[in-house]
Image (cartoon, rainbow, N blue to C red):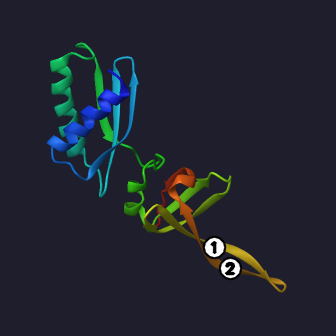
């Protein structure tokens, strides 16, 4: 089975299980180990991963695509994983994001909003004003297709 076959299987499973807010992020197949990474518009739950895993196992066991000895892992993409789809950005509004642009520029700041294919990030810069530096808040408007990689930064503010 190819990644595209597993992708179709995941999409079918999500539809049949009525997980409309859940979507596929990545698939890794190495020998007889299949890893499926999911995300959701809200929050991915253990229950969702477990139900999809059992649904997929039933199909894979029936068609023997990987024989009888395979490992299937269905999980969330993970906190430190890069955001791969525009659909992942809205639920992260208000969090710190680190974005690498196609022009080589890096921006780290607060994810303010998402409109269409535009991602808005707010951050501070220092501007020389006379003999002093003044902090100015800037908002960058970044086209999703210009993003090479972006990650949400985890903060532990207590």
Q: Taking 34 as reference, is 157 left or right?
A: right
Residue that badge 1 annotates: 124
Between 47 and 3, the residue placed more toward the observer is 3
Gap between marks 1 and 2 measured at Cα: 6 Å
Badge 1 vs badge 2, beta-carbon distance below 8 Å: yes
Position of residue 12 in the picture relative to residue 88 (left or right): left
Horizontal side of residue 88 vs 44, given as left or right:
right
Position of residue 17 in the picture relative to residue 134 (left or right): left
> Closest to the observer: 40 or 157?
40
Q: Which residue is mark 2?
A: 135
7 to 119, vertically: above or below = above
Give residue 25's position: percent from left, percent from top.
Answer: 38, 42
Query: In the rendered image, which quarter contains the C terminus?
Result: bottom left
Which of the 4 image quarters holds residue 139?
bottom right
Query: Could you say where residue 127 lies in the image, as x and y percent from the top left?
Result: 75, 78
Q: Which quadrant would residue 89 be assigned to in this image? A: bottom left
Q: Nearer the viewer, residue 118 or 30?
A: 118
Crowd class of label 2 (few under 14; some 14 to 19; many from 20; radius 10 Å): few
């Amino acid at each position: 089975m190819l990644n595209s076959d597993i992708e179709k299987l995941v999409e079918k499973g999500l539809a049949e299980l009525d997980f409309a807010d859940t979507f596929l992020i990545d698939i890794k197949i190495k020998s007889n180990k299949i890893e499926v990474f999911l995300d959701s518009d809200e929050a991915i739950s253990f229950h969702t991963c477990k139900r999809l895993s059992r649904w997929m196992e039933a199909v894979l066991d029936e068609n023997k695509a990987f024989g009888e000895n395979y490992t299937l892992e269905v999980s969330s993409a993970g906190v430190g994983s890069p955001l791969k789809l525009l659909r992942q950005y809205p639920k992260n509004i208000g969090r710190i994001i680190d974005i690498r642009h196609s022009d080589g520029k890096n921006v780290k700041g607060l994810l303010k909003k998402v409109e269409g294919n535009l991602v808005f990030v707010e951050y501070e810069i220092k501007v020389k004003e006379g003999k002093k530096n003044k902090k100015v808040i800037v908002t960058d408007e970044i086209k999703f297709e210009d993003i090479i990689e972006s990650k949400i930064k985890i903060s532990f503010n207590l």
